[in-house]
Image (spheres, helix red, strand yellow):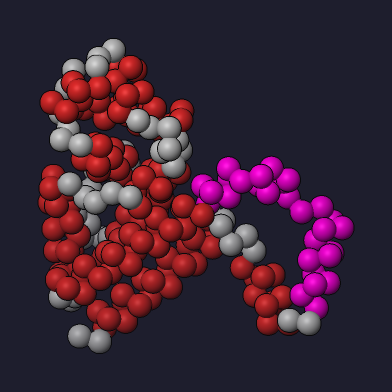
Amino acid sequence: MDRAQVVRAAIALLDEAGLDGLSLRRLATRLGVQAPALYWHFKNKQELLDRMAAHIAAEEAPLMPPTPRVLWDEWLAAYARSLRSAYTRHRDGALLAASTQPPPDQWPDIELRLRVLGNAGLSPADGMRALIAIGNYVTGFTLEEQLRATSTSAATGPLTYAQYGEARARLAGYPRLAEAMREVGDPQGAGAFEDGLQMILDGVRSRVHSR
């Protein structure tokens, strides 16, 4: 048994039982060992969770510098989309990400992102602010998606025609809200995610252009 095997087993258990059901005892049983054996590989559960989150985040294509034909903001947007895709592939993936920190072997990837943003004209501090904003946005958006998918309200399915009419009637006295809801649509859908991502990137672009 090695660290990679423990992480894979832990992610499989996460998919089955969720973050609340992920215990070292259950993980040890799955691996056919006693729980103390896991401490040969991870000093505590938090270190294991950090490694799981890093593994999930790396499931998409390996992080590479943008090619000359790819703009830095397009590269950054692709990274955000891949992160969301990785989180949604696993039960409680975003919740796991929200409760962990990047382990040291992820620091080279962060350094690469900061270097790309630096080449675009951002200082290291502004580059870090941009990465934090995008990372928090992806995690928060995906967390709401996953929570809604498991809530009892999600089981009711799409609005019926009558329910849609009732919703419109309730918004009759709020014309700006009604117009916004018509245009935005599903607040947890792919379109809403892309709109929010582009608004954040607009802010990063303005910071680049102001320097």
The reply, left or right, for residue 39 in relation to residue 137 is left
Residue 38 forms part of the magenta stretch? no
Q: 19 and 172: which one is in front?
A: 19
Q: Residue 12: x and y, percent?
A: 38, 27
Q: Residue 159: x and y, percent?
A: 77, 54
Residue 155 forms part of the magenta stretch? yes
* Residue 4: quadrant of the picture: top left
Residue 122 in view in this figure: yes
Q: 125 and 68: which one is in front?
A: 125
The residue at the point 51 percent across, 54 percent down is: 144
Can you say whether 119 is above or below 102 in the image? Answer: below
Q: 111 and 34: which one is in front?
A: 34
The residue at the point 29 percent across, 59 percent down is: 75
Can you say whether 86 is above or below 192 in the image? Answer: above
* Residue 2: quadrant of the picture: top left
Residue 58 in view in this figure: no
The reply, left or right, for residue 195 in relation to residue 200 is right
- For the N terminus, the quadrant is top left
The reply, left or right, for residue 144 in relation to residue 47 is right
Stretch of the chain drawn in magenta? 145-172
The residue at the point 69 percent across, 42 percent down is: 155
